Image (spheres, rainbow, N blue to C red):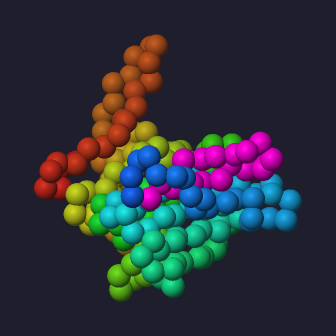
């Protein structure tokens, strides 16, 4: 939960440990990120296994991943493409090993995705997938086994490996009428991850 006593520029992220009625404890204070307290953070997200907390500073490309089990495993990286374009955090792979960011250019123009690996043999590596100029990023959904990522760009579904390599693009016939421009919304995977 976010709390502010009215004296801080930014809200402080607090956590409840143990029970829902526990006393909130400060966890992340964006006011400490700069001397004047004007730097805020992007979205904060806890991994699906509850072992990691990640956040990014949207402008500048700084990304931090905090290990809740072992602070020595925490990561901090400046991803060059995020520093240039800015980004918003999207989410975690089901196995909690890969984070996905969406790249932002200008005012809410979503241009592509960055995948960052936080654990396993590829720890600390990243890859990116940029969309063609006439498309914009919308939704992304992981297959249940975390091996494939489906990205919706409005008119196509792009299927990527966990390393960020494109394996298939599905261009679908979308119904358009005089008063309605057809779009593809959120892709959905089958339970076994065989179909999207």
Q: Residue furthest top?
A: 179
Question: Between residues 34 and 175, which one lies in front from this camera angle?
Answer: 34
Question: Between residues 157 and 148, which one lies in front from this camera angle?
Answer: 148
User: Which segment did they paint magenta?
Assistant: 1-17
Image point 43% across, 39% down: which residue?
154
Look at the image and tell me whether residue 126 can be seen.
no
Residue 82, located in which quarter of the rendered image? bottom right
In the depicted structure, whether residue 185 falls above or below residue 95 = above
Q: Position of residue 10 (x, y in %)?
A: 73, 50
> Is 55 positioned to the left or the right of 125 in the image?
right
Residue 147, located in which quarter of the rendered image? bottom left
> Is 55 positioned to the left or the right of 31 in the image?
left
Question: Between residues 65 and 138, which one lies in front from this camera angle?
Answer: 65
Image point 22% across, 63% down: which residue?
145
In the depicted structure, whether residue 182 falls above or below residue 192 = above
Q: Position of residue 86 (x, y in %)?
A: 65, 58
């Amino acid at each position: 939960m976010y709390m502010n006593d009215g004296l801080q520029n930014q809200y402080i992220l607090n956590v409840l440990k143990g029970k829902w009625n526990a006393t909130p404890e400060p966890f992340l204070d964006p006011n400490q990120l700069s001397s004047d307290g004007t730097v805020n953070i992007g979205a904060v997200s806890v991994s699906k296994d509850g072992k990691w907390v990640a956040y990014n500073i949207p402008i500048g490309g700084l990304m931090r991943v905090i290990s809740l089990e072992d602070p020595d495993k925490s990561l901090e990286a400046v991803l060059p493409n995020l520093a240039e374009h800015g980004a918003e955090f999207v989410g975690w792979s089901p196995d909690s090993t890969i984070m996905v960011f969406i790249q932002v250019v200008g005012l809410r123009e979503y241009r592509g995705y960055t995948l960052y690996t936080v654990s396993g043999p590829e720890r600390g590596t990243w890859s990116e997938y940029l969309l063609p100029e006439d498309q914009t990023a919308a939704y992304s959904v992981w297959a249940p086994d975390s091996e494939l990522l489906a990205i919706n760009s409005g008119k196509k579904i792009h299927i990527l490996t966990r390393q960020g390599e494109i394996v298939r693009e599905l261009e679908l016939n979308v119904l358009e009428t005089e008063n309605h421009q057809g779009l593809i919304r959120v892709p959905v995977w089958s339970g076994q991850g065989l179909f999207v």
